[in-house]
Each structure stands twice: as structure tokens, then as C-alpha cells.
Amino acid sequence: MTTGQPKVPRYREIAEQLREAIENGEFADGESLPSEHHLSERYGVSRGTIRQTFAYLRASGIVSSRQGARRQVLRGPRAQPMTELLSFSRWARSIGETPSSRTVGTEIVTPSPEVRERLGLTQGEKAFHVERVRLLSGAAIMLESTYYPERLAAPILAMDLDAESITDNLEDYGIVFVDAEHSIEAIGATARVAELLGIHIGTPLLRTMRRTTDPAGEVLECSFDTYLGSAVAFVVRNSVAAGAVSRVRSRLSN
């Protein structure tokens, strides 16, 4: 008797490779995928296996379900993988978009108890708050509200916050973002968020709460990023080899 991880069906392996190719921009929105015949020869499998692959991708909302025609990549939210720590700007460029920002405000603040705890600050310590609308190729898709230890205010204020990545530029100061914890919840747009993003009140949004540390484990930021649900989707890959997964109820707040 042998033991080990369950074998992934071949059609699922091919589907994941095609999904990655789509996410990496090898196939544009609306572009036709290769034919069943081409893919069966490419992967050395039967056309029946390729049909299973397409059925899986179709069920995932990635390709069209047109009968008698080449399957096309569906236009939809940009996929942002959660398995790699990338700045917004690097992620945007990786999918062929041009990142930019519209700065709403910067200030030294007395942090809320939640922010103070996330940053590891003591009572009375200040935080530096940066709020920006983030854009992809000129379209607003996210409101970024980030808190930093006060010591980072000077290098950040020296940047062009509408054109530059804070995360990427802090690397020039030897400040490197290495590990992050994320939580994600669904919310509706408040009046203020709706005005800043140019959307209707109550529009579905995805809000991520992120806490990022440097190689020594020192907290560098905590951020509350509110994305248009129609513009961005978060991709998480799981494995039975990764261990147990727990689920916790999110705390909704406006």
C-alpha cells in the first residue's frame, strides 16, 4: 500500500497552466484560446481531456461557453495573486497596466487602538497616515489608507506620491517589505468612499486589511485598501500539503 498526496487530474493540471498564462497576459481579454486539436497535441492528451479542461475553465468563469467556436478569454476583474508580496505598482505593471495615484492626504495622527495595536505602538506614539486613490491606466480602482511608524514620514514625504510606489522607493533606504498578513471582507461603499472612487453609494467593494513586516519582524505598515469588486479579484492557491485551514468570522465596520 502506498501513501501520498492525491493525484491531480491531468485536465486540472492543464487548466491551471492555462489560467496562469491568462493571468500573466499571454492571452488578452477577448482573445481566442488555441483549438482543442492544438492543445491536445501540445500536452499529449486526448481531445476529451482538453474538453474537460475547457469545461473546468468555463465553470470558473475564465473562458466563454460558445458552442462550435474557439473559447475566448472572458473580460473580467484583474486577478491579483495573494501568494506573492508585490506592491500595487509592480502588480499593475505585471498585468500590462500603468499604475498611478491621486493623493487624498498625508498627516501625522494619533492612531486608533486598532492601528496602534497593528503597528505595535505604545500609548502616546504617533503614526503617519497616507491616503491615496490608486489608478490602473487612469481608472480609479482602489482607495488606499495606510499607516506607518512616524519615523517613515520623512522619506515618504520626499516622494512624488502621485507617481511613485512607496513600497518600492523605501527599498532605496534599506527598508524592505518581506512578510504580510491579509484579511479580506466584502463591504458596501460609504458616501465618502463613493465620492472618492466615483461610484454609487452601496457599490460592492472588497476591503483588505494588511500588516507588513521587515526581515527582522518589525512592523512597517498597516493598510486598509478598498477595491472595486468589479475591477479586482484575489487569487489564492491552496494545497492539502499546507496543513489545516481555519475560518474566522470577519468584523464588518464602515
Image: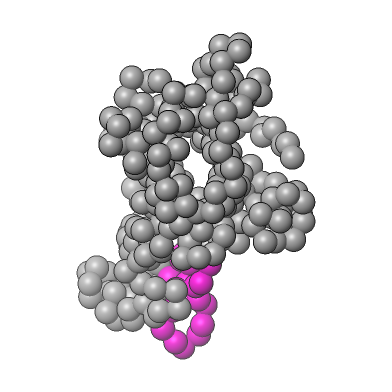
Q: Give the overall secondary structure of the magenta segment.
A: loop
Looking at the rendering, which quadrant does residue 239 occupy? top left
Along the viewing direction, whichever of 215 and 40 lies nearer the viewer: 215
The magenta stretch is 54-76
* Whether residue 237 is visible: no
- Residue furthest toward the top? 123
Decide whether residue 70 is among the magenta residues.
yes
Q: Residue at x 30, y 32 (%)?
A: 173
Q: Is residue 106 above or below residue 20?
A: above
Percent position of residue 249, x then y: 67, 32
Percent position of residue 13, x then y: 33, 57
How are the colours assigned in the image?
one colour
Percent position of residue 166, x then y: 41, 41
Along the viewing direction, whichever of 162 and 247 lies nearer the viewer: 162
Q: Residue at x 50, y 65 (%)?
A: 138
Decide whether residue 225 is among the magenta residues.
no
Q: Is residue 75 above or below residue 208?
A: below
